Image (cartoon, rainbow, N blue to C red):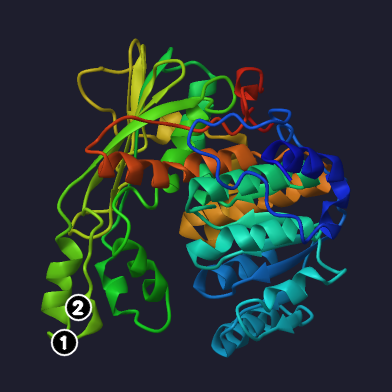
Amino acid sequence: MTEHDRRGFLKALGGLCAAATGVAAAGAGQPAGAQPAGGGGAAAGLTAPKLDTIRWGLIGVGIRGSSHVEQLLRLDSCEVTAICDIRPSAIARTLEIVRKAARRDPAVIEGQADAYRRLLDRSDVDAVIISTPWEDHVPQAVHTMRAGKHAFIEVPAAVTIDECWQLVDTAEATRLHCMMLENVCYGRDELLALHMCRQGLFGDLTHAEAAYIHDLRWQAKEITEGTGSWRLAHYEKRNGNVYPTHGLGPVAQYLNVNRGDAFAHLVSMSSPALGYREYAAREFPPDHPRNRAKYVCGDMNSSLIQTARGRTILVQHDVTTPRPYSRLNLIQGTKGALGGFPTRIAIEGRTDVHAWQTDMVPWYREFDHPLWRKVGEVAAKAGGHGGMDFVMLWRVVQCLRDGLPLDQDVYDAASWSVVAPLSEQSVARGGAPVDFPDFTRGAWRSMAPLGIVS
């Protein structure tokens, strides 16, 4: 079967794609910038039948997955009907959370790495949250959608360009939601900035800065369990921005990426890879595996993206050096700017533009996003990265209940995640420009911008 025929076949399957488990995922092998056959933007503004009660299954209930269980059980119209993990300790901890909330025990699926397929076979699961190691996200999400269930994936959604295309093509073929759970898009200050951008306070937007700067060297001590037990392997074989979406997602929404603008190309450079090596030498015996490892991912990666409309975005990544946490979260326009960490503002005609205004109370009073006005107090009590996790899941549930499009779609998942493999390509080529694939196939020109929830 040719690539063209295979794509046509998948498109024709539509909602019946759940039965086509033997069909290879379309999109594999697409080079950056490729324009595959098929209708562009088929998943844009996607809606699904309303769900009065959302029955959730969770693949992976470690620290992150079990926190999702805790938040979901706070929400009306949500049931956790099935959980899956290969570690009995994770299952036991999650069952404690369920019982503490006085909810009925979910079905428990244990076993080997493919045990999650038994969860997908269940008829009492409508939507699935995937909180597993990065390399497992796409296979599990593709199988989830083929099983007729909405897929919600932890960040990043995909690791390779091919995987990004698989998500896009499967979501378009099945007409099911595929959302990357980029919780930072629901942070109070990020939603404040989005609201202010939509009100035009910064004028015409020209530049943004995003980052994930977080000293995570301690994860090297997670040898058999925990994020470090699998995450450090990526730093031994990949050199680029391997975790771009926390900072990038919000500024992409400010700039209407995939909804009037699009990522066009990037250049990327990495500093030397010294942080993990020096940490391992200090914290582990000389013959320890952490000292035998060869770390290749530069401590600081800086990538510069230019959009189709000519705007620029700086995206940085550093998890291996001592430095205070920052996502930068800067948006610049012709009339002013907002920066993060700490959040501060300068707007022509409203502040002294030669000095940052750091008192944000009046700005919250005037421009706090309606989502935070509505559920912010509850979110603050619920916790979860300062409440952003609760707001995100509350909004997801609202959209599923009311049959609304999600705030983040599969094109966002692919476009934000693909920065990682593209940055690796650019670094390997000495900082040469690399083109972005157009996952919308040109439909970004007519897609409506993300609105402000009323």
Residue 159 percent location from the top left of the image: 47, 53
Of 203 and 298, the residue lying toward us: 298
Residue at 51 percent of width and 61 percent of height? 384
Whether residue 167 is visible, yes or no, is yes
**Mark 1 → mark 2, Cα distance in angstroms:** 7 Å
Residue at 75 percent of width and 65 percent of height? 56
Residue 206 percent location from the top left of the image: 37, 18
Q: Is residue 412 above or below residue 126?
A: above
The residue beneath circle 2 is: 292
Look at the image and tell me in which quarter the C terminus lies: top right
User: Farthest front residue?
Assistant: 1
Q: Amino acid at mark 2?
A: Arg
Residue at 64 percent of width and 27 percent of height? 451
Residue at 77 percent of width and 61 percent of height? 22
Res. 299 image quadrant = bottom left
Of 104 and 56, the residue lying toward us: 56
Give SS at disc 1.
loop
Q: Is residue 164 above or below residue 235?
A: above
Whether residue 187 is visible, yes or no, is no
Q: Determine contact: label 1, label 2, CB under 8 Å.
A: yes
Give residue 103's mark.
Answer: none
- Sequence-earlier tag: 1 or 2: 1
Give SS at disc 2.
helix
Alpha-carbon neighbours of circle 1 within 10 Å: few (<14), some, or many (≥20)? Answer: few
Res. 445 image quadrant = top right
Q: Amino acid at mark 1?
A: Asp
Residue 187 percent location from the top left of the image: 49, 45
As drawn, is 347 to the left or to the right of 137?
left
The residue beneath circle 1 is: 287
